[in-house]
Amino acid sequence: MMSGGYTSIDNQQVSGSVPAVSDHGHVAVKFTDSDLQTFPPAASQGKISGGAQPPRDADDSFSRPAGASDEPQASGWFRAFTFAAYKPYFDVDTSDVLDRLKESLFPFRGTFTEKTSANPDLYGPFWICSTLIFVAASIGTFVTYIAHKLKKKEWDYDINLVTWSAGVFYGYVTVVPLALYFILKYFSAPSGLVQLFCLYGYSLFVFIPALCLSVVPLEIFRWVIAGVAGFMSATFVALNLKAHISSAGERWFLIVAGIFLLQLALAVVLKLYLFTVTV
């Protein structure tokens, strides 16, 4: 028995309840059973003690796997317009790029396509073209500036040299491999499109040192430099495609000859517009 008007409580297991009072001024209060005695709840699962899941409106930035995204993954043709589609072609080491640059300077080996067949890249071709644009614009500007100053004539910077170089190099390394891709497919000798982009991109590397040597103010020397660079680039592309194109039948020689002459034509165009200085 307790003082204050409360009734006695029997010595029994009463879970989650408050003893009723005797006087009319108090009301009995009961609490519903809960699972507070087990934390976290038995139904939850997780990494620590079964992994209690956060509420739906919680920020799950730290619970998502690395690289996970809320955006739906693109499929089909839409994937071609995502960065993820081209990421594997830029996943190359510096040593890989250097080896491929060295291979392009030895055109008579003809082993470039074989060595890059498992992992063709677009990283090297992109930076080769970008470097060519910079070198062509800077060397061309420097040579014309010196030529004007030696003859004491007024010199003006030609911004068209940058845009023209970008159009030539980016356009050539994109359009020509794309056209060759469909030609080879027509003659039942299909080749990978990225492989062709890779081959043509690295074939332009030889023009970088050639452009640097064009600062020598001798026209005959510039013609020799442009001719040697064009011959090396054309031989590099033709020999690397010869083994593959030979399966196209009797016309394989015409295709290889066309590839060789087209690369030489590029060298002539570069000589006339980039290796020539007019005052």
Image (tube, helix red, strand yellow):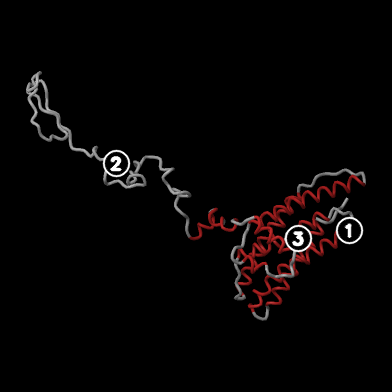
Instruction: Give how far apart the Cα atoms at labels 3 and 1 are.
Output: 19 Å
Residue 113, numbered label: none
> For the view shown, which residue lies furthest in the top direction?
4
Q: Secondary structure at mark 2?
A: loop
For this rendering, which residue is in front, 104 or 162? 104
Counting residues from the N terminus, which is met first, the one under dot 3 or under dot 1? 3
Compared with 227, 143 (above or below) is: above
Q: Say which amino acid is labelled 2.
A: Pro
Q: Residues within 10 Å of mark 3 (few under 14, many from 20)?
A: many
Q: Are marks 1 and 2 in contact (CB under 8 Å)?
A: no
Pick the residue in front: 182 or 126. Answer: 126
Which circle marks residue 40 in the picture? 2
**Are discs 3 and 1 less than 8 Å apart at CB?**
no
Q: Residue at x 80, y 54 (%)?
A: 212
- Answer few, some or many: residues within 10 Å of disc 1's Cα (few below 14, many 20 plus, some between 14 and 19): few
Percent across and percent down for residue 130 are 70, 52
